[in-house]
């Protein structure tokens, strides 16, 4: 592999990540601002900080809030899953880390919500898992890349509007 192809590969991966982030930002925006009002569920506060640095402005819910899993699932279901999102998609964006622990958490939460007939949006996580794995395996590992990704995200958002 030449140096140029490595850089091209990184650029292609970052562009894919920026597109997925842009789409999720729009789904996350409040409906009053032209979004779908879908919350993003992440593991903790540093994950929220990473998403905010990338341009997320809507609701971000955290798994690590001192609640047991059944209480969290009941809260998410009653708060967000009683009706579909404004865009007709799943009412919650589920974004756990793409490491082993995050994968187990993602599966557990998805399966519990699906058992209550609620779908979840996993597109962002699936794209970031493929595109950003070399840079890290956690949502918070996006933070150092925000300076590079955020302008790409903003450019995509401008093109979409």
Image (cartoon, helix red, strand yellow):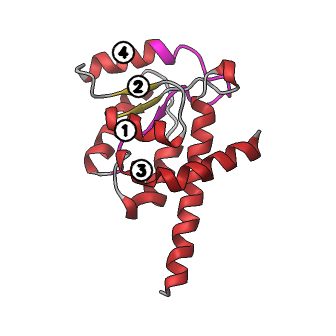
Pointer 3 residue: 142
Q: Residue 102: which quarter of the image?
A: top left
Distance between the alpha carbons at the discs numbered 2 and 4: 13 Å
Q: Is residue 47 above or below residue 19?
A: above
> Residue placed at 27% from the left, 50% from the top?
100
Give the residue furthest to the bottom.
2
Q: Nearer the viewer, residue 81 or 48?
A: 48
Q: Earlier in the sequence, mark 2 or mark 3?
A: 2
Can you identify the residue that label 2 sits on?
Answer: 61
Do the CB atoms of the residues marked 2 and 4 lie less than 8 Å apart? no
Q: Judge whether 16 appears above or below 121 on screen.
A: below
Residue 78 point in image, percent of width and height = 44, 12
Which comes before the other along the chain, label 2 or label 1?
1
The stretch in magenta equals 79-98
Is 93 within the magenta?
Answer: yes
**Mark 2 near mark 1, Cβ–Cβ under 8 Å?**
no
Quadrant position of residue 112: top left
What crowding class fits label 3: few (fewer than 14 Cα within 10 Å), some (14-19), or many (20 or more)? Answer: many
Q: Quadrant of residue 30?
A: top right
**Among numbered discs 3 and 1, the one appearing first in the sequence:** 1
Upstream in the sequence, badge 1 or badge 4? 1
Q: Which residue is mark 4?
A: 74
Residue 72 appears in view:
yes
Separation (CA) of disc 3 from disc 4: 29 Å
Of circles 1 and 4, which is in front?
1
């Amino acid at each position: 592999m030449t140096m140029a192809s490595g850089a091209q590969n990184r650029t292609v991966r970052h562009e894919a990540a920026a597109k997925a982030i842009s789409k999720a930002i729009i789904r996350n925006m409040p409906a009053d601002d032209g979004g779908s009002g879908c919350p993003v569920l992440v593991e903790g506060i540093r994950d929220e900080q990473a998403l905010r640095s990338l341009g997320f402005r809507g609701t971000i819910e955290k798994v690590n809030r001192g609640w047991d899993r059944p209480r969290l699932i009941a809260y998410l279901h009653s708060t967000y899953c009683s009706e579909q999102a404004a865009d007709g998609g799943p009412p919650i964006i589920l974004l756990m880390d793409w490491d082993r622990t995050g994968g187990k958490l993602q599966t557990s939460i998805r399966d519990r919500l699906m058992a209550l007939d609620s779908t979840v949006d996993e597109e962002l996580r699936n794209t970031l898992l493929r595109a950003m794995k070399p840079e890290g395996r956690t949502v918070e590992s996006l933070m150092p890349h925000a300076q590079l990704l955020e302008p790409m995200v903003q450019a995509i958002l401008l093109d979409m509007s």
